[in-house]
Image (spheres, helix red, strand yellow):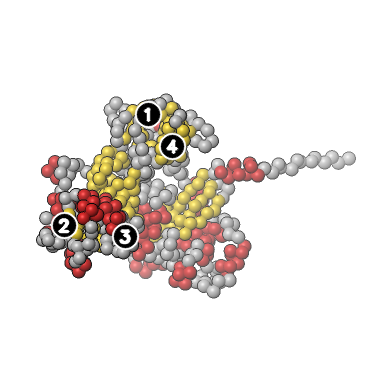
């Protein structure tokens, strides 16, 4: 008589177990970069399609689209990410498109960035938080020109400046190059030479065809000479620089910028923020910057309860044993008798800048700088050089135009607490903001502090430029003269603005002048003010007031 063995059916995980396993997966952020029409959006669409991350109605909508630039009856996968109408009509990427997908090994956030030179600033924005940069290289364009495209070089340079830990060059359109190993090796040789000059530490090369799907998710049968991983295999296995343990973070000095002071009642005073580097533990002795007052960590508080330790990138609230003066924009570091674990504390520093605005960066201009949780005024003291993306040489320049990269010296009105960007991205980066338009105009990667010669120091006395340039120009009843002096200041490179708009009441002028003064902008008015309002406005501006009865300086005179 035959016997039957009944194998119990596997127990399906509960919904809570599924969520827990999903939440515990590593998250990898990567960005695509490269020149226009290299196939960045097509590659991402292929990744989403072949990993079964596209809904059927989305695929059907793309297949039925009247815009289809794919040849040979293929679906135009770029339409899955190019969502703007102008992008679909022109067949280019304009804005940064973020997409999400996951596999059994990892979760992914993709930043699909534009390739046109005029949208380089969008690429820098999308790449600023990436763990991996995929630089697309068009094999067909390489064969035509015999070298890498300038935009491919520019994006690789920006990826190196942003400190992206891993760069992979995906040599696309291998189908149009006949799947030639010789072509791939030529591109590999030139790109690796570029990566070596940029000091990129982790560089990989993968030949792919985003249109045909070769080596994107599935290995290619058309390139038997390539025995490396597919692009997805690479993304699933590349080590994450952010996946550090407490033991590894213990070796790094503590950096805890204070974002908010919590005072819910008389019995609690906590300091909220995100750990930028190192580890915080109860009982640890810490020091506040810039006051240098010391205390001991009493508790590490979170919504889910107290923690025994906190490391990057956890957001926490710290309660100290002592009541010390500490506010937003200041920083907690580990107390050390030798000071070896402290960040650089300086008002003058050198940095690499990716310029993102139509108005060029020029020495003498003042911007708002946001560094960690600290907001200060930053004045451009010197434009040391501009980077030629073709040769990677540093060349002399008087201005830095949009999408250009250069080395700049800044001076701030308050000290910053920073590390070089190559050591810590969180404390080594800042953004520049136009004080008038509130537009983000530059991405800054700090190189280090600058030692100012005593004769050039501005700590004890203002520079001649600052002392002679007016804060306020009063030209009562002379609107034409106000326009003329505005044009003179602008022509001389100064930032100035007329404050005669009817929506600005006279009573608000002192506050307006003060705000413009903090932003480094000259206020000009032709209003007829009553004596009380004029006195209050002049008091805000201090001694740097220009009246019509005085000589009107030329642009060059305002700097002498």
Q: Earlier in the sequence, mark 1 or mark 3?
A: 1
Observer-nearest residue: 11 or 173? 11
Whether tag 2 and tag 4 are in contact, CB under 8 A, the answer is: no
Label number found at residue 262: 4
Contact, mark 1 vs mark 3 (Cβ under 8 Å):
no
Give the left or right position of residue 44, taking residue 384 as reference: right
Single out the mark in the foreground, 1 or 3.
Answer: 3
Real-space Cα distance between discs 3 and 2?
21 Å
Looking at the rendered structure, the secondary structure element under dot 1 is loop
- Identify which residue is drawn at 14% across, 41% down: 454
Residue 208 horizontal/vertical position (percent): 47, 60
Helix, strand or loop status at disc 2 = strand
Figure disc tally? 4
Counting residues from the start of the chain, the first of labels 4 and 1 encountered is 4
The Cα–Cα distance between marks 2 and 4, rounded to whole angstroms, is 45 Å
Residue that carries the numbered disc 1 in the rendered image:
323
Decide if residue 518 is in sight here.
Answer: yes
Res. 354 visible in picture = no
- Tell me if residue 200 comes above or below residue 269 in the rendering: below
Classify 10 Å Cα crowding around label 1: few (below 14), some (14-19), many (20 and above). Answer: few
Q: Quadrant of residue 63?
A: bottom right
Mark 2 neighbour class, 10 Å CA radius: few under 14, some 14 to 19, many 20 or more: many
The answer to whether 211 appears left or right of 460 in the picture is: right
Q: Nearer the viewer, mark 2 or mark 1?
A: 2
Give me the C-alpha separation between circle 4 and circle 3.
36 Å
Q: Mark 4 or mark 3, which is nearer to you?
A: 3
Between tags 2 and 4, which lies in front?
2
Earlier residue among tags 3 and 2: 3
Residue 509 appears at what percent x and percent y? 27, 56
Question: Residue beneath label 3, please?
Answer: 504
Q: Residue furthest toward the bottom?
A: 66
Q: How far apart, in angstroms, are the residues tagged by discs 1 and 3?
A: 43 Å
């Amino acid at each position: 008589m035959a016997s039957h063995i009944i194998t119990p059916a596997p127990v399906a995980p509960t919904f809570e177990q599924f969520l827990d396993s999903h939440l515990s997966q590593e998250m990898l952020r990567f960005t695509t970069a490269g020149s226009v029409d290299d196939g960045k959006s097509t590659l991402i669409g292929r990744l989403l399609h072949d990993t079964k991350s596209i809904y059927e109605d989305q695929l059907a909508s793309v297949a039925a689209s009247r815009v289809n630039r794919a040849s040979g009856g293929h679906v135009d996968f770029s339409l899955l990410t190019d969502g703007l109408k102008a992008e679909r009509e022109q067949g280019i990427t304009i804005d940064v498109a973020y997409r999400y997908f996951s596999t059994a090994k990892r979760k992914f956030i993709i930043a699909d960035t534009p390739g046109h030179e005029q949208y380089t600033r969008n690429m820098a924005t999308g790449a600023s938080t990436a763990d991996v940069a995929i630089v697309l290289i068009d094999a067909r364009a390489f064969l035509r020109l015999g070298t890498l495209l300038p935009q491919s070089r520019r994006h690789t340079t920006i990826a190196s400046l942003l400190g992206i830990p891993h760069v992979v060059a995906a040599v696309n359109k291998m189908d149009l190059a006949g799947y030639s190993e010789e072509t791939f090796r030529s591109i590999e040789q030139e790109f690796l030479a570029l990566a070596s000059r940029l000091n990129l530490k982790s560089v990989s090369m993968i030949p792919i065809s985003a249109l045909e799907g070769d080596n994107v998710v599935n290995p290619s049968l058309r390139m038997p000479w390539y025995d490396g991983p597919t692009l997805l295999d690479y993304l699933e296995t590349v080590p994450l620089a952010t996946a550090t343990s407490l033991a590894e973070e213990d070796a790094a000095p503590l950096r805890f910028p204070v974002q908010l002071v919590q005072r819910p009642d008389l019995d609690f005073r906590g300091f909220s923020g995100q750990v930028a580097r190192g580890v915080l533990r109860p009982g640890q002795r810490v020091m506040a910057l810039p006051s240098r007052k010391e205390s001991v960590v009493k508790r590490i508080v979170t919504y889910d309860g107290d923690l025994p330790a906190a490391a990057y990138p956890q957001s926490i609230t710290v309660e100290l044993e002592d009541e010390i003066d500490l506010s937003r924009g200041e920083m907690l570091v580990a107390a050390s008798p030798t000071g070896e674990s402290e960040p650089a504390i300086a008002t003058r520093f050198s940095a690499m800048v990716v310029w993102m605005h139509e108005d060029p960066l020029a020495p003498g201009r003042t911007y708002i700088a946001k560094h960690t949780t600290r907001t200060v005024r930053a004045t451009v003291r010197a434009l040391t050089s501009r980077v030629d993306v073709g040769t990677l040489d540093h060349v002399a320049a008087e201005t830095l135009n949009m999408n250009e990269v250069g080395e700049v010296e800044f001076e701030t009105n308050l000290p910053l607490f920073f590390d070089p960007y190559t050591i810590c991205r969180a404390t080594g980066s800042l953004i520049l903001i136009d004080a008038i338009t509130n537009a983000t105009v530059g991405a800054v990667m700090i190189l280090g502090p600058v030692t100012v010669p005593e004769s050039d120091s501005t700590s004890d006395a203002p520079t001649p430029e600052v002392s002679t340039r007016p804060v306020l120009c009063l030209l009562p009843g002379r609107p034409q003269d106000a326009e003329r002096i505005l044009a003179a200041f602008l022509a001389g490179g100064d930032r100035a603005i007329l404050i005669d708009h009817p929506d600005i009441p006279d009573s608000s002028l002192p506050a307006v002048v003060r705000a413009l003064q903090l932003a480094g902008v000259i206020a000009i008015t032709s209003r007829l003010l009553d004596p009380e309002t004029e006195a209050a406005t002049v008091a805000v501006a201090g001694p740097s007031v220009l009246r019509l009865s005085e000589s009107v300086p030329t642009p060059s005179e305002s700097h002498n």
